[in-house]
Amino acid sequence: MSGNRDLPPHPDDQGRPLDHNRRRLLQAVGAIVSAAAAPSLHASIPAGNTADGGGYDAIVIGGGFAGITAARDLSLRGFRVLILEARPRLGGRTFTTRFANHDLDLGGTWIGNSQPFVWSERMRYGVDVVESAAVAASQAIWMDDGERITGSLAQYAEIYEPAANHFYAPAREFIPRAYQPLFKEEFGNLDQISAADAIANLGLPAVQRDLLYSFAAINGHSFASESSYLDQLRWFALGNYHLWNLWDNLSRYRLAGGTKALIDRMAADSNAEVRLGTPVAHVKQSAAGATVTTLRGEELQARAVVVAVPLNCLADIEFSPAISEVKLSESRRRHTGSGTKVYAKTAGKQPVFMGHGTQQMPLCFAWTEYDDPDSQLLCGFGASPELLDVNDDRAVASAFARYQPSVTVEESVSYDWNIDPYSKGTWCMYRPGTLTGSLTELQRPEGHVFFAGADIANGWRGFIDGAIESGATVAQQVTQHIAI
Amino acid sequence: MVSKGRRLLAAMILAGLGPVAPHLAADNCDIDRGARLFAKCAMCHPRDETGVSGAGPNLAGIIGRTIADADGFPYSVAMSGMDGIWTPERLDAFLAAPMAYIPGTTMGFGGLRNPADRENLLCYLASEQ
Ligand SMILES: Cc1cc2nc3c(=O)[nH]c(=O)nc-3n(C[C@H](O)[C@H](O)[C@H](O)COP(=O)(O)OP(=O)(O)OC[C@H]3O[C@@H](n4cnc5c(N)ncnc54)[C@H](O)[C@@H]3O)c2cc1C
């Protein structure tokens, strides 16, 4: 992040719309503004202006992966960029903290090598990956009509894999291009029915049906009845129509040092000024640009604004003129992601396991994420906070005991993404109708205002990868817009 | 892990704070349990003599401190608007249901519903860093 370091030499991006000298000048200005990022110096900058009084080329609202990507790309092109982030930290729905001697991610965690945007970022910045302990699980645990079954991963796969392939069968026909979800144009009723409707129609034996309900529940992070079947099918396309490749992208690799390691590198590479703890209340457009008003009443001007807040938070910012009703109503309707994620530190050890429960259990999936010498860190996901009070250690312990009955939980941690006013939910999966009815509109810029975020990405929507895709795409749009 | 001395000190601090809810002053609270519960807070809140804040304000000596006084921390408008100090009673009520007690707080924590958990946590918060 700028503010406490010198500008690094960065490669010359020839062929960009700005001429060389102007870019150099802007970078120098950027350095001065960056130096002013310390709170005590804020007051010396006239409200609404950069240090030289010229206003910003772009203001990015939101410092998650989408906002950081957009701000980095724009600032490296020489534009003057300001990030306004509501929380006292960057990262948004990713949040690396320390727990049990690990860099633990309470939000977005796993990435995969079929995720082109995040994988290329982590390669270019040299951030290593580590594998989840459960990849080498010696035990699989699943539920059959309320009964806990244990076996090998291969035995579990015998039951689960054919059912999942059945569920995903229409994916190749209807999502032939994973990064152009609307390429096919005709989808029958697949976007109108829920994942649960589709599963019920498969006519599978109860054990397989229930495993699918739970699988759809973890993917949509809500009950299977909430998410669109078509949107679920997209994930299979993104996983190259291969179930275990999809799994490898959902839960195999995490970043060494956590997601923070990557976002810190991206932010350090950026020349954008960053203001933390600065929620935006209002965006008002004029002929020449826009005025952004913070919750504390400060007014800032820019030629373009990138709104990189969660879909569920979009309607909390006031826009004048108003943004489209489709954007507002989808924001108020919210995506499906509203479940729980919790980690528990055990005393003593159990077999390293991968557990697949039912969507009505407090945790519909649970597994060993870290296999330490004397204890383990278990990770679990649930379809709804109604099923589990994540802050109650006893409730968490008994939720994990459904998988490992003799487990002793010492401490547990979670983050209440659903009640945090700057996320109002977890990761994005769409409700029926949103993909075919609203995605294109959600992405559409309005005047000088551009929209970015994982929740409106084309490819890995709902993922870190999608956030970076969207941020990079919007940086291109803004470049075209302000170069004119 | 935590000495008897620290436990006593915690009870003394709590007792010294004027009208203290009797259960908070009790010396039978489980400070080790409180320390484990603090892991949830420690996700965001440092609690050390540096006073430096993280994703949440530093909680060193929080009991008896003026509400929203951590240096440079960008508190929510709702939290900044609160008057007075953090008494054990107020912390207890806040921790039970943060968003109900201070509507508009941006602390992403749903609350500790179990009164015994809050008692143990407060006991830990009252102990020396
Ligand atoms: C529990 C959980 C588990 C997940 N697991 C994975 C995973 O394993 N792999 C994966 O790839 N993805 C995962 N995700 C999803 C992934 O974290 C997100 O899709 C991605 O990080 C979103 O990035 P973003 O930049 O679009 O939005 P965000 O990260 O939400 O960033 C938006 C930013 O806008 C800020 N903001 C909001 N309102 C305002 C305002 N008014 N003014 C100023 N700033 C504002 C917010 O504070 C936030 O920093 C998970 C998410 C959660 C919650």
Image: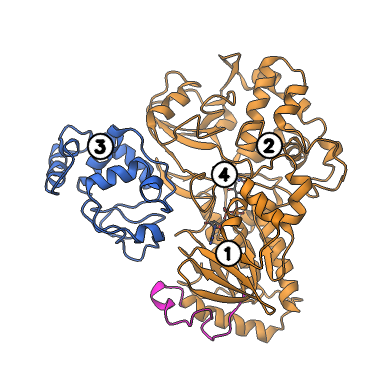
Chain colours: A orange, B blue
| Residue wearing tag 2 | A227
Q: Estimate the x, y position of residue B69 in percent, counting from the top left.
A: 29, 61
* Residue A208 in view: yes
Q: What crowding class fits label 1: few (fewer than 14 Cα within 10 Å), some (14-19), or many (20 or more)?
A: many
| Residue wearing tag 3 | B119
Helix, strand or loop under label 4: loop
Q: Amino acid at mark 1?
A: Ile
Q: Nearer the viewer, residue A202 or B129?
A: A202
Q: Estimate the x, y position of residue A314 in percent, counting from the top left.
A: 61, 56
Q: Estimate the x, y position of residue A35 in percent, counting from the top left.
A: 46, 77
Q: Amino acid at mark 3?
A: Glu
Point out the tag, 2 or 4, that comes first from the N-terminus. 2
Q: Main secondary structure of the magenta part?
A: loop
| Residue wearing tag 4 | A426
The residue sitting at 29% across, 34% down in the picture is B115
Q: CA distance from mark 1 to mark 2?
A: 28 Å
Q: Is residue A159 above or below residue B108?
A: above
Task: Give the magenta part as a residue range.
Answer: A36-57
Asked if residue B66 is among those painted magenta in the image, a careful observer would answer no
| Residue wearing tag 1 | A61
Question: Where, quadrant-wise, is the C terminus of chain A in this rendering?
Answer: bottom right
Helix, strand or loop under label 3: helix
Asked if residue A52 is among those painted magenta in the image, a careful observer would answer yes
Q: Quadrant of residue B30?
A: top left
Question: Mark 2 and mark 3, same subunit?
Answer: no
Whether the residue under disc 3 has CB within 8 Å of ligand 1: no
Tell me, yes or no, whether the two marked residues, 1 and 2, touch with CB atoms within 8 Å: no
Q: CA distance from mark 2 to mark 3?
A: 41 Å
